[in-house]
Amino acid sequence: MKRDLIDITDLSVEEIDDLISVAEDIIDHPDVYREKCRHKKLATLFYEPSTRTRLSFEAAMYELGGQVLGFSEATSSSAAKGESVADTARTVSCFADIIAMRHPKEGAPLVASMKATVPVINAGDGGHHHPTQTLTDLLTIKREKGRLDDLVIGCCGDLKFGRTVHSLIGAMSRYRNVRFVLISPEELRVPESVRTDLLEKQGIEYRETTSLEEAMPELDILYMTRVQRERFFNEEDYARLKDSYILTPDKLATAKWDLAILHPLPRVNEISVAVDDDPRACYFRQVLCGKFIRMALILMLLEVE
């Protein structure tokens, strides 16, 4: 029976830990994995712009010895003619062994998974889920901090529309003694459903604040996000909120020496380029982790030993 990955909760904690272990083995022994997916094909169906996610999926498949086909925007597919996601998924299943789909509509990859005859990976659906970014974040945290428990995690910026934040909270709330500090303007607070279903229902300690500086000294992880223009209904609200938080070297003065700064990227201006040379800036190492965890995920879903 085929496995899909639509939501990070589709994976058990044990499966996530196994994926991280395989990814770290790939990092240490890349030659062992070079032909693991020979003669296998990945289809990347990207209805929404992407740089890191699409290219890291493609790089992952190539480094496993496989091949890639697909499209990078809806206008270059039959969606422009009105073809449904379900029909596209059934069609592409005839050509590929596994599908990675990004779509602006929440739930589209789930619909695709119900019709596809090959595994479907959700590569981001609107403001909903982005499970492979979450796996990337977990691998990065594990490599930077050496653990996934006993952490204080600060999520800063757009916590309302930020699918990466919602998925990260869902994943990390399953590890022991994890506490969240949610830093955002009032208008971009984390949704009520995340607070009640992911945090309060599971007894996870959290607090909300509008001050990054006030939260900084207690954080082990700072997860920065951009205010996403594409999720706003009007330009005025976006313009008013887009510069709410800008991380600069001055604001890191009270941070722990071993703070890990993550960002799912792309950034606009919410992290100053002056922070890039700080050893605590992990976001470009995070990008590389994305390739390795997607390699591990492709192997798992294709049931390759």
Image (cartoon, rainbow, N blue to C red):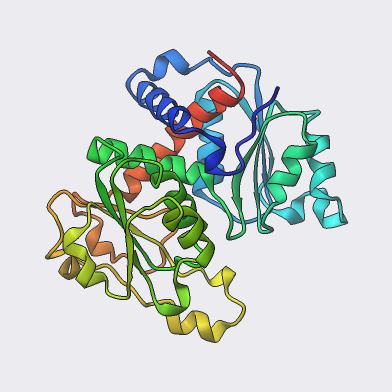
Is residue 265 visible in the rendered image? The answer is no
Q: Position of residue 258 (x, y in %)?
A: 16, 48
Rendered view: 132 above or below 180: above
Q: Is residue 114 left or right of residue 208?
A: right
**Figure quadrant of the N terminus:** top right
Q: Quadrant of residue 111?
A: top right
Residue at (80, 37) in percent of width and height: 115
Q: Residue at x 30, y 37 (%)?
A: 142
How many numbered marks, from 0 up?
Answer: 0
Instruction: Between residue 246 and residue 196, name the one nearer to us.
Output: 196
Give the quarter of the image for residue 268. Answer: bottom left
For residue 174, side relative to residue 9 (left or right): left
Residue at position x 66%, y 58% from top?
A: 104
Residue 49 visible in the picture? yes
> Residue 209: x percent and y percent?
31, 72
Q: Is residue 119 left or right of residue 24?
A: right
Image position of 172 (left or right of 11):
left
Name the residue rendered at 55%, 20% in the picture: 65
The one nearer the camera, 19 or 54, is 19
Residue 134 drawn at (x, y percent): 45, 45
Of 68 and 236, the residue lying toward us: 236
In the rendered view, tell whether residue 207 sits above or below residue 111. below
Q: Position of residue 98 (x, y in %)?
A: 67, 30
